Amino acid sequence: MYGKASKPIASFITFMVSGLAHELVCSVAFRKISPYFLLGMVVQVPLQVISKYYENSRFGNIIMWVSLFLGQPLLEVCSCSLFHV
């Protein structure tokens, strides 16, 4: 089975395992389960594929910068909304 998965499948599995581990640590630390960070990590896989398709173009550059500047702040706002509601 090793080495048989395609690159997108391997990326998805890697981000999923990393996201689940992150959610486990955060849910123990904050005593609350929040799916936002897991969702944020899993959404990176399609963005990776899209940006690879538009590599060396203005649209690919826009996707990268928008996800960089909007992704993390939106995750923080969604996460904070769970604790202050």
Image: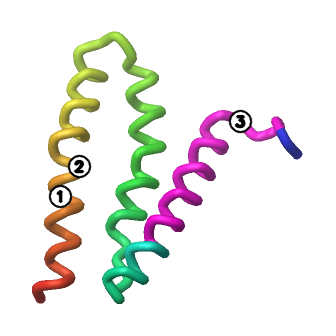
- Closer to the chain start, of discs 3 and 1, is 3
Callout 1: SS: helix
What residue does disc 2 label? 71
Q: Position of residue 14 (x, y in %)?
A: 59, 49
Between residues 42 and 53, which one lies in front from this camera angle? 42
**Residue found at the far right of this picture:** 1
Q: Nearer the viewer, mark 3 or mark 1?
A: 1
Q: Position of residue 23 (x, y in %)?
A: 44, 71
Residue under the point 22% across and 51% down: 72
Give the spatial CA distance, label 3 vs label 2.
26 Å
Residue under the point 38% across and 74% down: 26
Q: Nearer the viewer, mark 3 or mark 2?
A: 2
Whether the residues at callouts 3 and 1 have beta carbons within 8 Å, the answer is no
| Residue 74, numbered circle | 1
Whether the residues at callouts 2 and 1 have beta carbons within 8 Å, the answer is yes
Query: 10 Å neighbourhood of mark 1: few (<14), some, or many (≥20)?
Result: some
Q: Identify the magenta region.
A: 3-23
Q: Quadrant of residue 79?
A: bottom left
Between residues 25 and 84, which one lies in front from this camera angle? 25
Indicate the amino acid at tag 2.
Gly
- Please say if 10 is above or below 48: below
What residue does disc 3 label? 6
Give the spatial CA distance, label 2 vs label 1.
5 Å
Q: Position of residue 70 (x, y in %)?
A: 16, 46
Q: Position of residue 25 (x, y in %)?
A: 45, 73
| Residue 49, numbered circle | none
Give left or right: position of 74 versus 52. left
Indicate the amino acid at tag 3.
Ser
Magenta includes 4?
yes
Magenta includes 43?
no
